Image (spheres, rainbow, N blue to C red):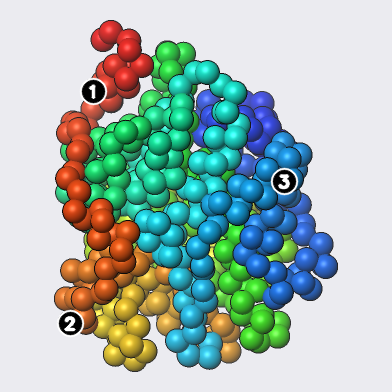
Amino acid sequence: MQYFSTNQQILPVDFRQAVIDGLAKDRGLFMPEEIPALPASFFQALPDLSLREIARNVAWLFIEKEIPGPVLGQIIEEALNFPIPLVSLEPNLHILELFHGPTLAFKDVGARFMSRIMAHFLKDTEKKVYVLVATSGDTGSAVAQGFYKVPGIEVIILYPSGKVSRVQEVQFSTLGHNVTSLEVDGTFDDCQRLVKTAFADATLREEMYLTSANSINFARLLPQSFYYFYAYAQLAGRVPNPEVVFSVPSGNYGNLTAGLLAEQTGLPVQSFLAASNANDTVPEYLTTRTFRPRPSVATLSNAMDVGDPSNFARMQCLFGHSWEGMQTRVSGYSFTDEQTQKAIREVWDKYGYLIDPHGAVGYLAATSYRQMHPATHAVILATAHPAKFSEAVALATGQIPPVPAQLETCLKREKVSVHMANDYGQLRAFLLRQQGVAV
């Protein structure tokens, strides 16, 4: 299969090249030239399939013979070695818990898969590879853990100073070895702009092997589609032919784009809910037809604090740049921090369930949608463990979430990061020094 750039200024490439480049040389995002349909037999068997069996079937559509079947199977076995349960709050309201991986966030799925795919493709490459990634919180920890101590790969993470939670920060800024954290004076959008500028710097890329690891990279996006199938499989095992709507806490829109990708391969989905905080660029577009990128604002659900979401370009491609097409399949919602806090409390009071601020935004969108569509099964994607946002959860509920062992270990380590101005010249000089180039 070939992959084209959303900017359409370069020739298509194969899956391997799309993964290694991360961002296309024309600054576009890679997309498959076609989205194959899964056979009817797959969907008939879906309720009886494990997550790993689902992943092998879906991944093979997009990777084909570029990775041998047994190798791909081993990658999936290693990457998806934790549960992703569907928890029912009431008969038609469910939560897909995506936070049981090593960094307690949904991004473990994509980062662990992508790191192993990349390691496979680069195993015979002598040149050191630099993974450059911007994070608004959870991407950094998932990527850091996914690539930690992988030979031949250096990870450089840019994050906005003072705009990620302490728990998120220590998960990627305390590792050392091949992981370096750059604490940038600015917002996530500033960090993302710096990363994109580096990828567009042809002279820099002649000096060093750069690739991306957030949802810009298709190998991070693809595995996120797996759990949409798995959620449906778990639900279909309880309710024959359920009408499902997915409520997706959304920031850079990789998670929602992965769901749309799953739908286009044949997964039966009634609708998708783009659940956002005050950074409501896409919900606004769905209402007004106007896409208006702007600086992000800080909220309780900080991993969604994105004012110019990269994956919007992919969403447009999936709908042939049709506003009507996207608006028919995706409904946009946005909520304030005050509403988010009340939702955390409501979920605890009604169901005895602790939910983090991002999941709470998803809950609010699902609740709003169900007022008009009570018969549908709403699946909320719970993207982070509540212990990662214990202050917000405790303030709303009076309950302190139990701290999982892997998180407790992180909290005992010292932060090691490099402070940097919001300036591309400084980032460029830093990168060249890593490569041993005098600046």
Mark sitting earlier along the chain (1/3): 3
Rendered-image quadrant of the N terminus:
top right
The residue mark sitting in front, 1 or 2, is: 2
- Identify which residue, 104 or 271, lies in the foreground: 104
Identify the amino acid type marked 1: Gln
Relative to 104, 340 lies left or right: left
Q: Tell me residue 233's x, y (percent).
A: 65, 74
Q: Residue at x 72, y 36 (%)?
A: 66
Q: Tell me residue 5's x, y (percent).
A: 60, 34
The residue mark sitting in front, 1 or 3, is: 3
Q: Residue at x 56, y 21 (%)?
A: 125
- Identify which residue, 265 or 5, lies in the foreground: 265
Q: Residue at x 46, y 30 (%)?
A: 151
Mark sitting earlier along the chain (1/2): 2
Q: Secondary structure at mark 2?
A: loop
Query: CA gap, disc 1 to disc 3?
Result: 44 Å
Rendered-image quadrant of the C terminus:
top left
Q: Secondary structure at mark 1?
A: helix
Query: CA gap, disc 2 to disc 3?
Result: 49 Å
Q: Do callouts 2 and 3 mark residues in contact (Cβ within 8 Å)?
A: no
Q: Tell me residue 38's x, y (percent).
A: 77, 59
Q: Tell me residue 321's x, y (percent).
A: 60, 49
Q: Quadrant of residue 342?
A: bottom left
Residue 398's disc number? 2
Q: Which residue is mark 1?
A: 426
- Identify which residue, 310 or 44, lies in the foreground: 44
Identify the amino acid type marked 2: Gly
Query: CA gap, disc 1 to disc 2?
Result: 44 Å
Q: Which residue is mark 3?
A: 70
Q: Is 247 placed above or below 22 here? A: below
Residue 77's disc number? none
Q: Residue at x 43, y 65 (%)?
A: 100
